[in-house]
Image (cartoon, grey):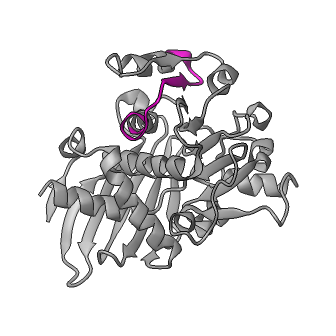
Amino acid sequence: MRVITAKDVLGRITVAELVPVMEAAMKDISAGEALHPPRFVVPINEAGRMGMMYGALHNPPLHGAKVLSLYPDAPRHGLSSHQGFVLLFESEHGRPVAAIEADALTALRTAAVSMLATRRLGRADPRIFTICGAGEQAEYHLRGALECFDPSEIRIWARRPEAARDFAARFPDAPVPVRVCTSLVEAITGADVITTATAARSAFLAGADLEPGQHLNLVGASLADMREVDDTAVARMLMFTDSLDSSSRESGEIMEARAAGAIGAAYQVTELGAVLAGAATGRTSATQITGYKSHGLIVQDLAAAWHIAQTLA
């Protein structure tokens, strides 16, 4: 069994190359060809939690688990907010294949699925990308936008303006302007794609400020007690997700909007994999506001881990 570190992965695996890998995995999830039971999240202390995910993928036949320390403030100490390993096994004989450090893998596969959602659910030829957040996920979503699209501008907003400035400064050679916005409204006005990649516990993005035709990737709040957008935003969106099962338990935005009466029983949430497979409808007009609610699934980790293990062999 190989041990693959984040250092082994960084600079050698791109967001763009994982997009087709994630497309196949998402289709398998919606077709029932993958196993992803509910994750376990255990509070450790005020600083963080321990998470465990496990599951299996039929094509290729793989199974495994992901064990993490989830510490939102760890980046302030030079660490990832997702520290741990993905343990990968081949399912024909049960042989362990690799233990892959989880931080880089998680950032890459999450951004790859967001790029896939943007490509399928956003308007054609998005030009202005706004990223809310300045951490690891923000970085890889920025890289993904540059690798997968032809943006004219990338805007950065963070709750701490100094963090946004430090983040933008890491991309002096970007082929397009990377502009820091101190106002969130300024950051999202006129944007084609908005990605929220924060550690927010409560909503900071107001649905009243959204514009027709925008696409949102809701990435940062992956547990039921977290959210990034308000009830109005949820109500205005045509909503998609990676897993309806996960969304029913873990989508703080959708669950709280439903509890508040902002959305009713007829509010539809659709799996991205079903759209990719042609079994469900995505965006149908240029004026719809679409949202992709990311929870992060073990199947995505296993597919990315297999690609990484094969590529770096």
Taking the view exactly as shown, the residue that stands out farthest to the right is: 261
Which residue corresponds to the image point at 75% horizontal and 42% vertical from the top-left? 233
Q: Position of residue 206 (x, y in %)?
A: 75, 34
| Residue range corresponding to the magenta coloring | 144-162
Which residue corresponds to the image point at 42% horizontal and 61% vertical from the top-left? 23
Count of marks overlaid on the render: 0
Left or right of 134, for residue 213 = right
Which residue corresponds to the image point at 88% horizontal and 55% vertical from the top-left? 261
Q: Is residue 205 visible?
A: yes
Q: To which quarter of the image does residue 259 belong?
A: bottom right
Left or right of 1, for residue 51 = right
Which residue corresponds to the image point at 55% horizontal and 61% vertical from the top-left? 272
Q: Position of residue 227 (x, y in %)?
A: 66, 45
Q: Is residue 81 above or below residue 21?
A: above
Q: Position of residue 104 (x, y in %)?
A: 32, 45
Q: Is residue 155 above or below residue 310?
A: above
* 268 and 85: which is toward the camera: 268
Quarter of the rendering occupied by the N terminus: bottom left
Q: Position of residue 14 (x, y in %)?
A: 29, 44
Q: To which quarter of the image does residue 275 belong?
A: bottom right
* 278 and 296: which is toward the camera: 278
Left or right of 182, for residue 101 = left
